[in-house]
Amino acid sequence: MLGGLIVALMAAAWSSARSYFESGRRQGIEEAMREMARGVSSHCQLEGGALPPDVEKAMTAVRAMPARRRSTGKAKATDPVHAQLWILGNAIGEACWLRGHGQGVRRKAPAAGRIRLDLSVTELLQLGWLAHLGFQHMMPNYRDFEIHRFNGEVDAREGAIAVAKLEGAIPAKARPFADLSVQLKRRQKLVSDWWQASHARLTA
């Protein structure tokens, strides 16, 4: 009789301890999710402090999971709560990435009314010289004869393409000419006429 009472008391103590453990585990998970919800809503800055839909859905799924771990007879059985927490972590990570990616895209985008153009160092140097010489020759009081020539046919063609890139960045409504290819073909013809004629003289 005494042995049976002791066994019953030990079983009750074990059940009570396990119940306290599961209750504390559940409260710990819920408290952690509340802290994560505050952080995510503050980071994502949604209207009204709301959570991203995927994060809210994942948190609801975690809350709906039973607090008691399913017993499968395996010492290292996967806890279903762990699987839902993985889904929650993935949703939070994706929400934060989307927020940061969106900010990066907006930061890289030009301001309203501005145009951003990607040019190589060579193209910038060519355009700088062309703009400098063009500006001087547009001034009525310019009297010098500053000489700056292309190094060869390849250099001249690269310069022609650099100018075409600059012209192509002009909005269609603001372009002084409708067909961009006309100006480029004229520049390329100048290049071809000069270097083909030079080559013909050298081989004659």
Image: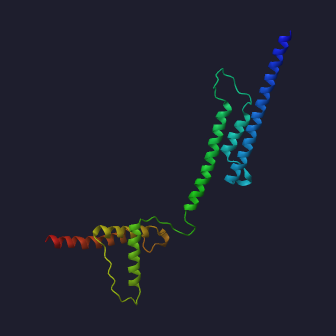
Q: Residue 46's spot in the image, x, y percent?
A: 69, 53
Q: How many marks?
A: 0
Establish if 76 lies above or below 6.
below
* Res 133 quadrant in image: bottom left
The residue furthest left is 204
Direction from residue 84 to residue 165 in the image, left or right: left
Q: Residue 52's spot in the image, x, y percent?
A: 67, 47
Q: Residue at 41%, 74% (x, y): give it.
A: 128
The residue furthest top is 1
Quadrant where the C terminus sits is bottom left
Q: Residue at 32%, 68% (x, y): give it.
A: 157
> 11 and 125: which one is in front?
11
Q: Residue at 79%, 23% (x, y): give it.
A: 15
Q: Can I make out residue 179 in this image? A: no
- The figure's colour scheme reads rainbow
Q: Can I make out residue 71 in this image? A: yes
> 83 and 1: which one is in front?
1
Establish if 188 lies above or below 17.
below
Q: Residue 193's spot in the image, x, y percent?
A: 25, 72
Quadrant where the N terminus sits is top right
* Res 154 quadrant in image: bottom left
Direction from residue 177 to residue 62 in the image, left or right: right
Q: Residue 14's spot in the image, x, y percent?
A: 79, 22
Direction from residue 177 to residue 201 in the image, left or right: left
